[in-house]
Image: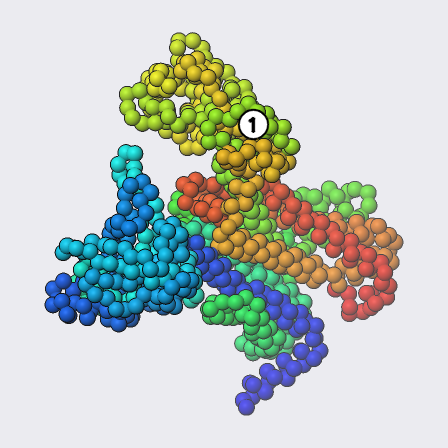
């Protein structure tokens, strides 16, 4: 063992034995911050993976499969060779090759994947089947694998593999048998391409074991018959159904019609994660239209095999939703991470400040900077490294996930900052050996040139981040500079506040000295003596946390308002009743009497208003101007004066129109054809929204329209307002055939996506963690001054200071920094939201369907700005009051003992 190693070990053991509580406090702090840091990436991965799996599960199996088809396979082969390539065994072997040819991470699920041979989807007519409207039912024959494994025989038996040119065996599902009145033993004669017929004997009826799975749902006809219509006017309908053959009977299908060989690969989504999406997209693109397509064609033995899948569309929609959510969550992550880093640096800085005399003495006695740094590093590493490792392990155990290395890197970063904070701060303060240090006051200390350069650098970065975010938005989830924009704004604000705070303190110290009583003057003098080095970090932590909290509160408030707005746009009021036709006066009266209904606005909606010189039909609503204007003002959807819809003569009907409809008004007029009459509309006002209709709309006076069309107007829709509508009573009053939609129910639909709910939970947790760490930073800074404050109060108590004056002294001393942080945090949060709101769209985070085309930007929430700032002031006053109370309980002898007063 070297001499250097021997010198370090006794120092470390001695420090841990003589001062165990600071080591324990550092252990707990690193354990908490490393656990939070390690849990965050796992929580994000888990939220994204759950959202992806839900998006995949919500899609129909027919859109998820990788569909490989080959038309008329083996036409260039001899009949015997062609029959051999179409058997169940040959198709199964080709399936294995196709599944192996698709690049990973796409993995086929053999339980739900299917393959085989089928006749055209148009079907073959069978004279024996029912003819509901005079047309023969048509059947598609499937020779698909695994029928025995995926179905239960409920009558008869499964079809056999035996077949001849004139006879086949088949089974049907229970739904097909019920609709087409088929039973085992029935015979269907289907036409053969070369002439004649083939008799298909029904041997049994089967029930799918998993009817919603890809095996039965990938082909629409397989499990359930379809009621199809012709293109005639009026259309004539017929049944389309499937006949299920044994897989080895596939060669017999070639005599009936042109056949199609298919392989439907259902993806195994159990291991699907959001991190694998780029590789999955690349693999799908290669397979459907790239080099991978050649591998699939070689596997099938068909040079014309085609590959298609809707999985890439599902992935694109998920990535679009994630791209709108990730930047908002990243803001909270960067803010909380910054506060955590500040707390660790503050803990190290306060420890160095507490041991300033000890370290200065060591330097004056010849201790070198490298030697001192190594010893301090070893001293902090002993509690910090085990705490970081334990925090990482606890996070990995608490939050499930596939990836461990992002959590390990995050915990390692926290541990490194915790280990380096004390040595770096101590070495910076003791570069030169000196026993007495100069006074470090906010009011007198001037910033160094290095600090000025650093502040200007941060200012440039903040301006660049804000400009980048406002110009192109935060669509690039990985742009750290953009996500750091609120933090950089907070850092700039902290630097500005620290620079300007001495000005009011200098101006107030003098005048307060001329007042009666020494408490005010003494409190301001002590506030001005707060160390400049230790005042910056707590203020920065508070400003960052307050900015993030204001940002987060505004985000959550924006989510609520966006969802409320979206639900209101769907219903137009608190509830909406669509009758599907004219509503009778009795039904309208029952709905008006529904409990909780404050007002009911009748609307007559027409979808048959045709442009006079064209074929386009426009949506038009006839309303009572006074009642509808009140509703528009109440809901905030395109408020307008009721007088705008009242006719002013000239034979025209004034209309409230949407911007898209306003383009149709040539010279401010539009001729419509309604009820055999020409109705001339005049654009009286243009609004982007209205309660009765969405998107394109025309709103007119019902009386004026009835006079123009010479037809009475009866309401088809009722819009209800009321804070406590009874949904059950409203549906009962509306009666059968009426569609009832409530605003509260529509709003609940917007929280369906696990990606959204997970992201919201992560955001709330990150903001809460940041707020807790900021409170810890404030307590650390206030706790560092506790011994000095207790000693001061003990001295002043001997001079006649009362307990009330002691409490007032400490409160007034704490208020300048607390008020400065609260005011600065409120202003910084407001400025950050105003600066960054054009680049953040909350639609993806708020709505279950982010593809609605609407954009909802961030706006300030007053409660989120004011409440956290008030909490800072209350906390500072509370800590000062507690210190004064504790000083009053303790005696003065211990505090005034020689060598113990600060």
Residue 515 sits in which quadrant? top right
Nearer the observer, 177 or 544: 177
Q: Is residue 165 left or right of residue 674?
A: left
The C terminus lies in which quarter of the figure? Answer: bottom right
Query: Which quadrant is home to the N terminus?
Result: bottom right
Q: Is residue 31 left or right of residue 302?
A: right
The percent position of residue 783, horizontal first and vertical second, equals 71, 61
Image quadrant assignment for residue 538: bottom right
What's the coloring here?
rainbow
Image quadrant of residue 780?
bottom right
* Left or right of residue 809: residue 837: left
Mark yes or no: residue 737 visible: yes
Q: Residue at x 52, y 67 (%)?
A: 400
The image position of residue 9, as x and y in percent, is 61, 84
Most extreme residue toward the top, as rendered? 649
Q: Nearer the viewer, residue 729 or 747?
A: 729
Regarding residue 434, the answer to whether it shows in the image is no
Q: Secondary structure at mark 1?
A: helix
State the image coordinates of residue 489 (x, y, percent, origin top left): 51, 49
What is the total number of numbered labels drawn onto the structure image?
Answer: 1
- Residue drawn at x 78%, y 51% as measured from the top left: 809
Residue on which disc 1 sits:
587
- Outermost residue to the front: 185
Which is more toward the observer, 417 or 358? 417
* Relative vertical location of residue 388 with respect to residue 634 in this rendering, above or below: below
Most extreme residue toward the bottom is 1
Residue depicted at x 32% and y 52%: 241
Return the residue nearer the eye: 415 or 723: 723
The crowding category of the residue bearing disc 1, from other C-alpha atoms within 10 Å (few below 14, some 14 to 19, many at least 20), is some
Residue 327 percent coordinates (x, y): 46, 52
Q: Say left or right for 159 vs 448.
A: left
Identify the residue shown where x is 58% and y is 73%. Answer: 390
């Amino acid at each position: 063992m070297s001499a250097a190693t021997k010198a370090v070990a006794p120092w470390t053991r001695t420090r841990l034995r003589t001062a165990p509580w600071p080591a324990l406090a550092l252990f707990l702090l690193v354990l908490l911050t490393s656990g939070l840091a390690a849990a965050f990436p796992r929580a994000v991965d888990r939220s994204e993976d759950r959202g992806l799996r839900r998006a995949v599960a919500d899609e129909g199996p027919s859109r998820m499969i990788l569909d490989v088809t080959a038309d008329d396979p083996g036409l260039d082969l001899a009949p015997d060779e062609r029959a051999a390539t179409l058997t169940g065994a040959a198709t199964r072997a080709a399936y294995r090759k196709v599944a192996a040819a698709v690049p990973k991470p796409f993995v086929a699920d053999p339980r739900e994947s299917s393959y085989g041979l089928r006749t055209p989807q148009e079907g073959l007519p069978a004279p024996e089947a029912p003819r509901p409207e005079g047309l023969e039912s048509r059947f598609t024959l499937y020779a698909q694998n695994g029928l025995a494994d995926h179905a239960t025989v409920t009558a008869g038996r499964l079809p056999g593999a035996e077949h001849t040119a004139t006879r086949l065996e088949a089974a049907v599902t229970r739904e097909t048998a019920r609709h087409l009145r088929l039973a085992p033993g029935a015979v269907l004669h289907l036409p053969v391409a070369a002439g004649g017929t083939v008799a298909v004997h029904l041997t049994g009826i089967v029930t799918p074991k998993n009817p919603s799975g890809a095996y039965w749902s990938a082909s629409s006809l397989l499990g359930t018959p379809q009621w199809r219509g012709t293109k005639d006017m009026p259309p004539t309908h017929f049944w389309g159904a499937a006949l299920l053959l044994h897989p080895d009977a596939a060669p017999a299908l070639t005599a009936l019609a042109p056949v199609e060989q298919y392989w439907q690969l259902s993806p195994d989504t159990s291991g699907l994660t959001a991190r694998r999406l780029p590789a999955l997209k690349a693999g799908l693109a290669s397979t459907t239209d790239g080099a991978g397509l050649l591998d699939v064609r070689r596997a099938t033995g068909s040079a014309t095999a085609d590959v298609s899948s809707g999985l890439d569309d599902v992935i694109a929609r998920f990535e679009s939703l994630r791209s709108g959510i990730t930047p908002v969550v990243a803001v909270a992550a960067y803010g909380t991470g910054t506060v955590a880093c500040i707390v660790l640096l503050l803990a190290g800085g306060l420890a160095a400040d507490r041991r300033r005399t000890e370290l200065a003495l060591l330097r004056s006695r010849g201790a070198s900077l490298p030697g001192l740094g190594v010893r301090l590093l070893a001293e902090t590493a002993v509690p910090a490294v085990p705490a970081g490792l334990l925090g990482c392990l606890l996070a990995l155990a608490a939050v499930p996930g596939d990836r461990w290395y992002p959590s390990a890197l995050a915990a390692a970063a926290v541990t490194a900052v915790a280990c380096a904070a004390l040595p770096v701060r101590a070495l910076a303060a003791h570069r030169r050996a000196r026993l007495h240090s100069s006074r470090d006051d906010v009011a007198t200390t001037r910033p160094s040139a290095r600090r000025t350069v650093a502040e200007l650098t941060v200012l440039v970065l903040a301006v660049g981040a804000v400009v980048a975010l406002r110009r192109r938005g935060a669509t690039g989830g990985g742009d750290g500079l953009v996500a750091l924009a609120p933090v950089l704004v907070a850092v700039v604000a902290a630097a500005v506040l620290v620079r300007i705070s001495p000005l009011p303190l200098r101006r107030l110290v003098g005048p307060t000295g001329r007042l009666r009583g020494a408490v005010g003057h003494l409190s301001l003098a002590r506030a001005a003596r707060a160390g400049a080095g230790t005042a910056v970090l707590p203020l920065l932590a508070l400003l960052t946390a307050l900015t993030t909290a204001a940002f987060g509160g505004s985000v959550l408030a924006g989510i609520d308002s966006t969802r409320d707005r979206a639900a209101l746009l769907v219903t137009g009021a608190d509830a909406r009743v669509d009758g599907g036709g004219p509503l009778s006066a009795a039904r309208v009266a029952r709905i008006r009497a529904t409990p909780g209904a404050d007002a009911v606005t009748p609307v007559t909606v027409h979808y048959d208003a045709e442009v006079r010189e064209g074929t386009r039909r426009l949506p038009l609503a006839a309303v009572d101007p006074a009642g509808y204007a009140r509703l528009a003002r109440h809901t905030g959807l395109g408020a307008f004066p009721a007088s705008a819809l009242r006719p002013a003569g000239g034979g025209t009907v004034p209309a409230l129109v949407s911007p898209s409809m306003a383009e149709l008004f040539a010279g401010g007029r539009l001729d419509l054809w309604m009820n055999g009459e020409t109705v001339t509309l005049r654009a009286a006002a243009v609004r982007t929204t209205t309660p009765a209709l969405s998107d394109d709309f025309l709103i007119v006076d019902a009386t004026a329209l009835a006079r123009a069309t010479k037809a009475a107007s009866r309401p088809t829709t009722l819009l209800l307002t009321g804070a406590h509508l009874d949904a059950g009573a409203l549906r009962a009053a509306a009666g059968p055939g009426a569609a009832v939609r409530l605003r509260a129910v529509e709003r609940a639909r917007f929280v369906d996506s696990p990606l959204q709910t997970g992201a919201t939970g992560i955001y709330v947790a990150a903001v809460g963690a940041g707020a807790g760490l900021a409170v810890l930073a404030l307590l650390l800074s206030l706790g560092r001054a506790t011994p000095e404050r207790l000693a001061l109060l003990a001295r002043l108590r001997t001079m006649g200071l009362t307990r009330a004056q002691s409490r007032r002294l400490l409160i007034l001393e704490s208020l300048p920094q607390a008020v400065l942080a609260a005011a600065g945090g409120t202003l910084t949060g407001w400025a950050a939201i105003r600066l960054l709101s054009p680049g953040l769209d909350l639609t993806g985070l708020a709505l279950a369907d982010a593809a609605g085309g609407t954009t909802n930007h961030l706006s300030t929430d007053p409660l989120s700005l004011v409440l956290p700032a008030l909490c800072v002031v209350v906390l500072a006053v509370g800590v000062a009051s507690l210190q004064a109370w504790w000083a009053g309980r303790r005696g003065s002898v211990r505090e005034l003992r020689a060598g113990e007063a600060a």
